[in-house]
Amino acid sequence: MVPPLYRLEERMDYTLRDAQIVKTVVHVGTKFIPFRVGTKVTFHYETRKCDAERTLIDESRTHQKPMQLVLGKQFKLEVWESIVQQMGLHEVARFRCDKSLVQQYPFVSKTIRDAQKQPQGGKRKHCCGLTFQNDGTGYRDLDELFIHPQDLEFTIEILSIETPDEYGKEAWQLSDDEKRTLVSRLREQGNVAYRTNNLTAARDAYSYAIGIIEQLMLKEKPHEPEWIELAQMKVPLLLNFSQCKLLEQDYYPVIEHCTEVLKYDPQCVKGLFRRGKAHAAVCNYEQARNDFQRVAELDTSLGTAMRKELAKLKDQQRLRDVDDRLKYCKFF
C-alpha cells in the first residue's frame, strides 16, 4: 500500500496566502516530487464559479486534452503555478481562489478555447487588454466574469510531473546557448538522415534548425556581429534544405531559400547552382542561364559542367518552344 502524502489534518481544508487560497484534498497523491524551475506539470482541471449553483466554466476533459505548465515561465495565471506546487503525483484537490488572484482567468480561458477551435498550424488571434475591454472575449460567460470578477474554484488532477532532465524541452523553453546547441544537433541529425536517403527527416531537421536561428536573429540588430554570425550559421542549413527540396522536385522553395542564401553570400556557388537548376525546372530560362553563367565565372573548374547545363537548358527551351507552337496550331 502506498503511504499517504499528507498527515490526517492536512487532508482537511487549509489556507494559503492568508486565506486567499483554500485547498480541499479530494484524493491523496501517490508520490511527492520536488518542484523547481523548468518542471513540467500535466493536469486536468475543472473551473467553477463559487456561486450557489457552482456554475461550471471550463473542463479540460471535455476536449480530452490536459493542461501543461512549465514552472517559472511566467504563465499568465500565476495562481495555477502556485497551487500545482502544493500537490503530489496523481493527487486530486479543489482550490477556492480569491477573485484578486484570478483576474487573468478570462484571458487564459479564451486563449485555451480559441486554440481548441483552431486547425493544426492555424494562426491565433492576439487579444490585448484594450481589445478585450472594447470587443469582449467572444464568450458570454467570460465577458460576464471579466466585468463582475468573483472567486473561482479549480479542481486539479495531477497526471504527471516531469523534471527538466526528464523531457525534451521545446524551443521556446531553451536559453539562447541551448538553442545554438540544438541547432548544431539538428544539423547533424539532418546530415545523417540525408546520407541514409531519408529526405523527409533531413528536410524537417534542417527546417526546424532554420526556425530556431530566425528566432535568435530577431533579437539582434541586422548586420551587427552577432547577427552576421547567426546568418553564417543559417546559410548551410538553407543550402541543405534546398537540396532536399530539389531532390523532392519542389522547386519554388529552392528558389526562395537559395535567393536568401545569396543575400548573405552573393558569391555562394552552391546557392547559384541549385537556384539555377530550380529555375530551369520551372522554365525560368533567363534566370537559370544567368545563375549558371555566374557559377562558371566564380569557379572556373566548373566551366565544363556549366557549359553542359547551358546546352541542356538551350535544348529544353527549344523543345518548349516547339511544343508551344504545336499547341498554338491546334488551337486554331
Image (cartoon, rainbow, N blue to C red):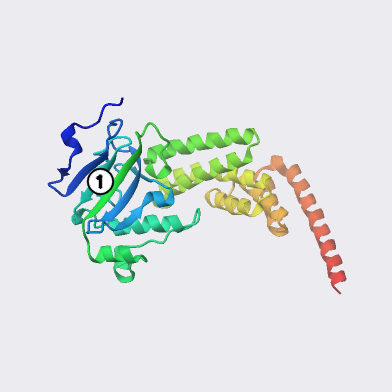
Q: Residue at x 43, y 58 (%)?
A: 124
Task: In the displayed orientation, state which residue is furthest to the front.
Answer: 53
Q: Which quarter of the picture shows residue 8? A: top left
Picture layout, residue 16 above or below residue 196: below
Judge left or right: residue 151 versus residue 120. left
Q: Secondary structure at mark 1?
A: strand
Q: Nearer the viewer, residue 214 or 201?
A: 201
Residue type at the position of mark 1: Arg
Q: Position of residue 3 (x, y in %)?
A: 26, 26
Task: In the displayed orientation, state which residue is furthest to the top.
Answer: 1
Picture layout, residue 4 above or below residue 266: above
Picture layout, residue 37 above or below residue 314: above
Q: Position of residue 19 (x, y in %)?
A: 13, 48
Judge left or right: residue 21 versus residue 63. left
Q: Position of residue 200 (x, y in %)?
A: 61, 42
> According to the image, label 1 marks what residue?
94
Crowding around mark 1 (Cα neighbors within 10 Å: few <14, some 14 to 19, many 20+) is many
Which quadrant would the C terminus be assigned to in this image? bottom right
Q: Nearer the viewer, residue 327 or 318?
A: 327
Judge left or right: residue 161 versus residue 96. right
Q: Position of residue 180 (x, y in %)?
A: 43, 38
Q: Nearer the viewer, residue 75 or 241?
A: 75
Q: Nearer the viewer, residue 82 or 310?
A: 82
Res. 37 in view: yes
Which quadrant would the N terminus be assigned to in this image? top left
Task: In the displayed orientation, state which residue is furthest to the bottom.
Answer: 332
Q: Residue at x 31, y 62 (%)?
A: 142
Q: Residue at x 65, y 36 (%)?
A: 197
Q: Residue at x 56, y 49 (%)?
A: 261
Instruction: Count the numbered circles shown.
Output: 1
Res. 223 in view: no
